[in-house]
Image (spheres, helix red, strand yellow):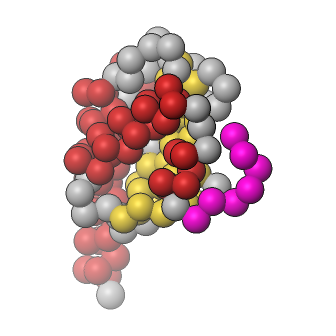
């Protein structure tokens, strides 16, 4: 990965070799289709989708794509994530394996519902 700061997800993806670009673009498309109201941005130097707050992030590494759906989603889907290295708020999807499309879609849907519920609760309080 280039150490320069990027301004867009397109710029971020373009700095990788074609095979990695394809995986990143597939992940981006999946997130965009699942959360069409979410805005794209770069946050913490990573592609980020934002809807009532940061929704999910992703990033390319040497051997994997990091997917960051927050700790709540990782905890909610823990039983389905046993095949992947993970931490409190992140999951590593190996670059040499297909992305678990259905699982990622459901995690993004979970995050959309979670952020939307929080936004609605804030609105009711104000």
Quadrant of image for the N terminus: top right
User: Where's residue 56, x and y in %?
Assistant: 44, 49
Whether residue 82 is visible, yes or no, is no
Q: Across the whole image, how many numbered discs are drawn on residues?
A: 0
Decide whether residue 5 is among the magenta residues.
Answer: yes
Please report the bounds of the magenta region as a residue range: 1-7
The residue lying at 58 percent from left, 65 percent from top is 7
The residue lying at 41 percent from left, 61 percent from top is 40
The residue lying at 37 percent from left, 28 percent from top is 77
Q: Is residue 47 above or below residue 50?
A: above
Q: Is residue 95 left or right of residue 117?
A: right
Whether residue 28 is visible, yes or no, is yes
User: Where's residue 104, x and y in %?
Assistant: 34, 33
User: Where's residue 63, x and y in %?
Assistant: 62, 21
Would you identify the image quadrant in which residue 126 lies? bottom left
Q: Name the outermost residue toward the right.
A: 3
């Amino acid at each position: 990965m280039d150490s320069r700061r990027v301004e867009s997800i397109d710029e971020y993806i373009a700095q990788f070799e074609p095979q990695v670009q394809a995986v990143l673009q597939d992940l981006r498309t999946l997130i965009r289709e699942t959360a069409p109201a979410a805005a794209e941005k770069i946050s913490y130097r990573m592609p980020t989708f934002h809807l009532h707050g940061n929704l999910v992030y992703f990033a390319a590494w040497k051997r994997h794509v990091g997917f960051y759906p927050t700790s709540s989603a990782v905890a909610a889907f823990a039983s389905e994530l046993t095949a992947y290295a993970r931490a409190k708020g992140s999951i590593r999807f190996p670059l040499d394996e297909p992305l678990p499309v259905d699982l990622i879609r459901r995690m993004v849907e979970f995050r959309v519902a979670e952020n939307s519920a929080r936004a609605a609760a804030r609105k009711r309080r104000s």
